Image (cartoon, grey):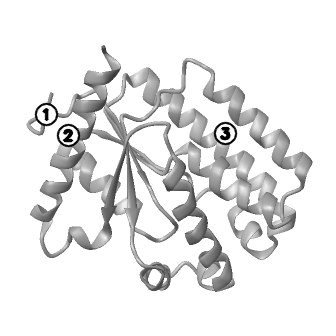
């Protein structure tokens, strides 16, 4: 246990739509808890730029790449014995991104079926530890767009805003039914890591209570 009462083998996942601040919170939590970090591979992704220019051509390739990378991270966390804060969950890939492309016709039914079957096979392996808690970052849609523009990634700023609105809506629908692990909803306006770093303390205390309750129930 650390000073917050969070077990040193815990796995904390940070989820939320693009631009909501997952990576920033992941780093901050890991530093406070003395945990390792797990980030998605964006900078060296060979499909990301292509995907934003042609969803239909590259959506399947991109999702397979993310699935493989995230499974490798799951295996790494398992081998370390936990103690991680993870930027984005593997559940978001299948239930939000891949499903959204299947529904809007930018991923074929066969490709989505292949992708889903691969995901289901992965989650059945012993290398797939479920998170102790999923932190869902939420905010207004306009705040998402503002953050995307502030981040300044050209491929994101050139993307049709309707895509971001669909993604935002999909996230809101997804989190209502998510039950793979406990969820802590955190509005991004509840803390300010730049101006008031201590504002993160109540969030950590909430996480600690949820993990403690989850593990006590799980051990009965």
Could you say where residue 119 lies in the image, as x and y percent from the top left? 69, 36
Residue that badge 2 annotates: 208
209 versus 121 height, above or below: below
User: Where does residue 9 sit, x and y in percent of width and height?
Assistant: 29, 26
**Could you tell me residue 65's position as x and y percent?**
70, 47
Residue reaching furthest top?
220
* Left or right of residue 153: residue 6: left
Marks 2 and 1: CB-CB under 8 Å? yes
Q: Is residue 13 left or right of residue 209?
A: right
Q: Nearer the viewer, mark 2 or mark 3?
A: 2
Q: Secondary structure at mark 1?
A: loop
Badge 1 crowding class, 10 Å Cα cut-off, few under 14, some 14 to 19, many 20 or more, is some
* Dot 3 or dot 1, earlier in sequence: 1
What is the number of callouts on the image? Answer: 3
Q: Which element carries disc 2, helix, strand or loop?
A: helix
Instruction: Say which quarter of the image contains residue 21.
Output: bottom left
- As rendered, which of 126 and 177 lies closer to the eye? 177
Q: Which mark, by number, is residue 5?
A: 1
Who's the residue at 44% across and 30% down the image? 77
| Residue beneath disc 3 | 68
Viewer-nearest residue: 44 or 112: 112
Lower sequence index among marks 2 and 1: 1
- Which is closer to the viewer, label 3 or label 1? 1
Q: Taking the image as drawn, is residue 34 in sight? A: no
Residue found at x 30% / y 14%: 220
Cα distance between the residues tagged 2 and 1: 6 Å
Residue 147 in view of the camera: yes
Residue drawn at the location 84% of the way across and 42% of the way down? 113
**Label 3: few (<14), some or many (≥20) within 10 Å?**
some
């Amino acid at each position: 246990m650390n000073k917050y009462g969070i077990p040193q083998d815990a796995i904390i996942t940070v989820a939320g739509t693009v631009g909501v601040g997952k990576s920033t919170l992941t780093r901050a939590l890991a530093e406070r808890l003395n945990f390792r970090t797990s980030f998605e591979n964006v900078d060296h992704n060979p499909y990301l730029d292509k995907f934003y220019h042609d969803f239909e051509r590259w959506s399947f390739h991109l999702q397979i790449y993310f699935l493989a990378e995230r499974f490798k991270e799951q295996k790494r966390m398992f081998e370390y014995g936990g103690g991680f804060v993870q930027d984005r969950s593997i559940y978001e890939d299948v239930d939000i991104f891949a499903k959204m492309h299947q529904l809007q016709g930018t991923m074929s039914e066969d490709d989505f079926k292949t992708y889903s079957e691969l995901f289901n096979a992965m989650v059945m392996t012993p290398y797939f530890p479920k998170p102790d808690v999923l932190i869902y970052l939420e905010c207004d849609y306009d705040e998402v767009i503002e953050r995307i523009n502030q981040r300044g990634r050209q491929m994101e700023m050139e993307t049709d805003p309707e895509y971001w609105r669909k993604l935002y809506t999909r996230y809101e629908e997804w989190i209502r039914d998510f039950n793979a692990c406990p969820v802590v909803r955190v509005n991004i306006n509840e803390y300010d890591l730049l101006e008031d770093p201590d504002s993160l303390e109540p969030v950590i205390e909430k996480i600690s209570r949820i993990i403690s309750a989850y593990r006590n129930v799980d051990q009965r």
